[in-house]
């Protein structure tokens, strides 16, 4: 079984994802560091998460596929950009969110945002999937990437510690 | 100069090049100047025009890409200047209509009314081509340079606020699809 980060990299490659805007986190970086070293991908470090939503929307408009990476604590910064750009304009944008605040979390401050995210996504009508095991990850990511493009709508993949491991204090 | 004069001069020069407009007067004046498929009116995505424009510029490196922003909108997304500088897209031209106010919400003075210098911030962020212009002749000159010299550019244009123009009738999702189709290979 390949490492979870390699499974995501290969799914992004298979779907011809090219531009990957992000704000780094310890989970996402395990994927992003591989994308950074791979000429098939163009990673775009951002100062703030809502920029990443805008950059992905612009790239997708040109027919260049994009995916966004962020941490749960930065998700809140994207809510208007998701609602009034990605949802209102129907932009088929995959979102990968490194979830702090769940099993094994040492920092209580991370918990409230993480708990709110599924509900916020539901309210925005954005489908979200949380693969629990490595053997279901490939199907989940492949399916989410297909769904985002076909439905012309954001789709979120939530990467919880049960799959990717908890950050240690 | 008025923003509408600048927009008319811009459209005359750039053919079918894409324009991403920030919400409020920048979008309304662009629409009033003549709707075109290569216009993306980001009516609601507060502050994001510069980021969307960066994405368009990265996705279509063979096209010159224009962003028409406002001072209020850019103040909401100053970090995008640093992100644009880091990426350095040669094909991105970011125009900021600086009327020193949040015109759409009643004309409250923005921070540029009290001394904030957006061109200075752009320069300090690392944008290589930065200009401030205050009349139509100077605007035309700098657009001429932006069409021939590599960017990224940030062009701050001092404008007098001159009231409301028409609002786009195209729906956001329809606008996005229509804009996307101008890039079809």
Image (cartoon, rainbow, N blue to C red):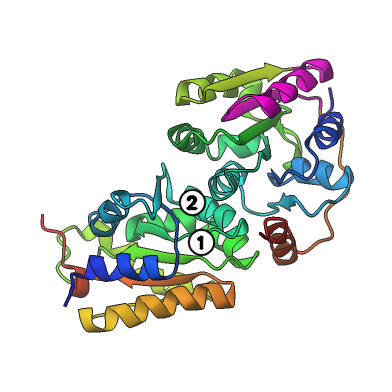
In this rendering, is residue A47 above or below A71? above
Q: Is residue A150 magenta?
A: no
Left or right of residue A98: residue A122: right
Query: Label 2 belongs to which residue?
Result: A50
Residue at 56% over, 33% down: B90
- What is the number of the mark on residue B28? none
Q: Which of B183 and B119 is in front in this view?
A: B183
Q: Which structural element holds mark 1?
A: loop
* Inter-mark Cα distance, 1 to 2: 18 Å
Query: Label 1 belongs to which residue?
Result: A65
Residue at 38% over, 65% down: A13
Q: Which of marks 1 and 2 is nearer the N terminus?
A: 2
Is the C terminus of chain B in the top left, top right, bottom left or bottom right quadrant?
bottom right
Left or right of residue A37: residue B40: right
Residue B152, given in percent of the width and then of the height, sits at: 56, 30
Q: Do labels 1 and 2 share a chain?
A: yes
Magenta residues span B134-160
């Amino acid at each position: 079984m390949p490492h979870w980060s390699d499974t995501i990299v290969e799914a992004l490659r298979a779907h011809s994802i090219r531009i990957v805007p992000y704000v780094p986190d310890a989970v996402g970086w395990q994927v992003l560091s591989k994308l950074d070293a791979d000429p098939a991908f163009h990673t775009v470090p951002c100062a703030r998460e809502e920029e990443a939503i805008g950059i992905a929307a612009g790239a997708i408009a040109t027919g260049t596929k994009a995916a966004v990476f962020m941490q749960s604590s930065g998700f809140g910064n994207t809510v208007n950009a998701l609602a009034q750009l990605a949802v209102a304009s129907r932009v088929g944008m995959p979102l990968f969110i490194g979830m702090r605040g769940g099993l094994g979390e040492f920092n209580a401050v991370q918990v409230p945002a993480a708990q709110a995210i599924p509900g916020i996504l539901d309210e925005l009508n954005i489908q979200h999937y949380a693969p629990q095991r490595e053997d279901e990850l490939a199907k989940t990511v492949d399916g989410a990437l297909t769904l985002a493009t076909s439905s012309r709508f954001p789709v979120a993949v939530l990467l919880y510690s049960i799959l990717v491991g908890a950050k240690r204090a | 100069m008025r923003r509408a004069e600048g927009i008319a001069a811009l459209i005359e020069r750039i053919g079918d090049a894409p324009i991403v407009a920030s919400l409020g007067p920048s979008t309304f004046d662009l629409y009033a100047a003549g709707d075109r498929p290569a216009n993306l009116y980001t009516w609601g995505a507060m502050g994001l025009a510069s980021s969307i424009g960066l994405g368009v510029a990265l996705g279509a490196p063979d096209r010159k890409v224009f962003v028409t922003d406002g001072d209020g909108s850019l103040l909401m997304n100053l970090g995008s200047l640093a992100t644009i500088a880091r990426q350095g897209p040669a094909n991105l031209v970011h125009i900021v209509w600086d009327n020193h106010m949040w015109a759409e919400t009643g004309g409250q003075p923005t921070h540029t009314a009290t001394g904030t210098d957006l061109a200075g911030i752009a320069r300090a962020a690392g944008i290589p081509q930065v200009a401030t212009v205050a009349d139509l002749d100077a605007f035309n000159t700098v657009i001429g340079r932006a069409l021939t010299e590599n960017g990224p550019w940030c062009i701050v244009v001092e404008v007098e606020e001159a009231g409301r123009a028409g609002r786009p009738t195209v729906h956001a999702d329809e606008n996005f699809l229509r804009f996307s189709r101008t890039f079809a290979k």
